[in-house]
Image (cartoon, rainbow, N blue to C red):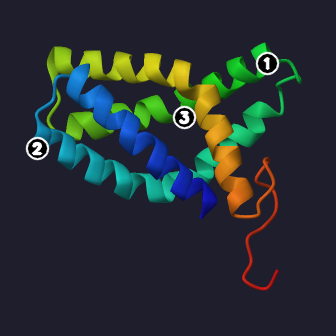
Amino acid sequence: MADTVALILFFTTTGIINERFIAGMAWDQILHARLLGAALMIPVARPYGVWRDWVMARASESRASRVFWDSVALVSFQVPIYAAIIAFSGASGTGLLRGTLGAALMMLLLGRPYGAFLNGVRRLFGVPAGGSKPMSLNS
């Protein structure tokens, strides 16, 4: 649940910015993309969290290492999904290319901020930063 809430909150906001100002999509296309994106974020949020935790195991304690590996995790998992979302929502040609490249650049820059946000949301849900504690109503 924590991974899903974090992904939807963070990337709905950043997706709108990219789709409007970089991809040049119309507001109705953005609405469609965000609704589709939210629906897709539900099943992929936890797999992304697991992927990120696995990739972040390679990071050292240095800030540069954590920034690098958080960005690698985000770009490698989310950019292909994002490209499919905006293509299905009406972006094509140069708009699709600009939107995908814009998302890749944004995700490179947002990898660590999102990772920190995800860890913060996990803390609010009582889940450790690595996300390894199973969620249970009985615990």
Q: Depth-wise, is mark 2 or mark 3 nearer the camera?
A: 2
Task: For mark 2, give the secondary structure.
Answer: helix
Q: Residue at x 49, y 58 (%)?
A: 43
**Helix, strand or loop at mark 1:** helix
Residue beneath label 3, please? 77
Residue carrying label 2: 28
Query: Closest to the observer: 5 or 33?
Result: 5
Q: Nearer the viewer, mark 3 or mark 1?
A: 1
Quarter of the N terminus within the rendering: bottom right
**Residue 70 in picture, x, y percent from top left:** 67, 27
Binning the other alpha carbons within 10 Å of mark 1 as few (below 14), some (14 to 19) or many (20 upward) gives few
Determine whether the residue tagged by mark 3 lies in a helix, strand or loop: helix
Q: Residue at x 20, y 40 (%)?
A: 30
Disc 2 and disc 3: Cα gap in Å? 26 Å
Whether residues under marks 3 and 1 lie with C-beta atoms below 8 angstroms apart, the answer is: no
Residue at the extreme right: 61
The amino acid type of the residue labelled 1 equals Arg
Q: Real-space Cα distance between discs 1 and 2? A: 39 Å
From the viewer's perspective, is 89 left or right of 103? left
Q: Is residue 76 left or right of residue 132?
A: left
Give the residue displayed 82% in from the left and 62% down from the top: 133
For marks 2 and 3 on the same chain, the one whose residue lies earlier in the sequence? 2
Amino acid tagged 2:
Asp
- Is residue 56 in view? yes
Q: Which residue is mark 1?
A: 63
Which amino acid is tagged 3?
Phe
Mark positioned earlier in the residue sequence (1 or 2): 2
Report if the CB atoms under discs 2 and 3 are less than 8 Å apart.
no
Q: Position of residue 73 (x, y in %)?
A: 63, 30
Query: Considering depth in this image, is 92 or 68 the residue closer to the camera?
Result: 68
Residue 50: tell me if it is visible.
Answer: no
